[in-house]
Amino acid sequence: MYTIETPRLGLRPWKQSDLRVFTRMGLDPRVMEYFPGLLTPQQSLDMIGRIREFMEANHYGLWAVEIKKTGAFIGYTGFSVPRFKADFTPCVEIGWRLAFPYWSRGYATEAAAGCMEYGFTALGFEEIVSFTAAINKRSVRVMERIGMQYCQDFEHPALEDGSPLKTHVLYKKRK
């Protein structure tokens, strides 16, 4: 049932039942604080469609994360390939997004660590990157907890000049 298991979490393909919670996450200003804006319900559904297509084509991607004990869907963790051009692309990025009620419980770190291990061992990645807005200290802490090293700041090309989110930090980990 799970592609990746950690002590408390299971990472798995998406289910229809995940859509409602994921749509609410896209409308939550706390969850979307370091993104350019909230997602409409249709944008959330479109995003899940792209995630599923990517997983079908690549046999990896952004997995749904659930608490094994309860079966509760809490967000996603996994890999993507950034579509923008930068001095570090092409690359494989690890990312996560959890519903607010599940923050500050170590779930993001646990899921990302399990995912990172899977990427190096099962998928054979040589290097995995992660990046976020420089002001997103919570995600930076997760990157550091899973053993990633700071590499550089960069200006995200998809964000407008003057945006407080424009400056990003890049972290990497090699096998």
Image (cartoon, rainbow, N blue to C red):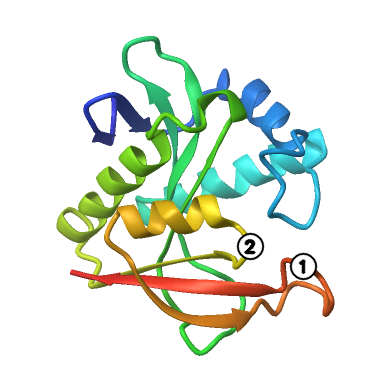
Tell me residue 149's x, y (percent). 33, 71
**Badges 1 and 2: C-beta atoms under 8 Å apart?**
yes
Residue under the point 39% across and 58% down: 143
The picture places residue 34, in percent across and down from the top left corner, at 68, 54
Instruction: Residue 67: name its quadrant.
Output: top left
**Camera-side residue: 84 or 108?**
108
Res 156 quadrant in image: bottom right
Task: Give me the residue at 53% from left, 49% from top.
Answer: 53
Look at the numbered disc 2 and give the secondary structure of its residue.
loop
Task: Check the image and report above or below for 28 versus 134.
Answer: above
Which residue is tagged 2?
135
Q: Is residue 43 left or right of residue 112?
A: right
Real-space Cα distance between discs 1 and 2? 8 Å
The residue furthest top is: 70
- Report the front residue among 4 and 132: 132
Looking at the image, which residue is at 28% across and 54% down?
Answer: 116
Q: In this view, does 14 lie to the left or right of 149?
A: right
> Is residue 31 toward the left or the right of residue 150 in the image?
right
> Dividing the image into 4 quarters, which one contains the C terminus?
bottom left
Amino acid beneath label 1: Pro
Q: Where is residue 70 in the image (x, y as percent from the top left)?
A: 39, 9
Q: Can residue 160 be seen in this view?
A: yes
Q: Is residue 37 above or below residue 65?
A: below
Q: Which residue lies furthest to the left in this view?
A: 121
* Crowding at mark 1 (Cα within 10 Å: few <14, some 14-19, many 20+): some
Q: Which sits in the foreground, 9 or 149?
A: 149
Q: Mark 1 falls on what kind of element?
A: loop
**Which quadrant of the rendered structure holds the N terminus?**
top left
Residue tagged 1: 164
Residue 86: image x %, image y %? Answer: 56, 85
Q: What amino acid type is highlighted by mark number 2? A: Ile
Query: Relative to residue 45, is residue 119 depicted above or below?
Result: below
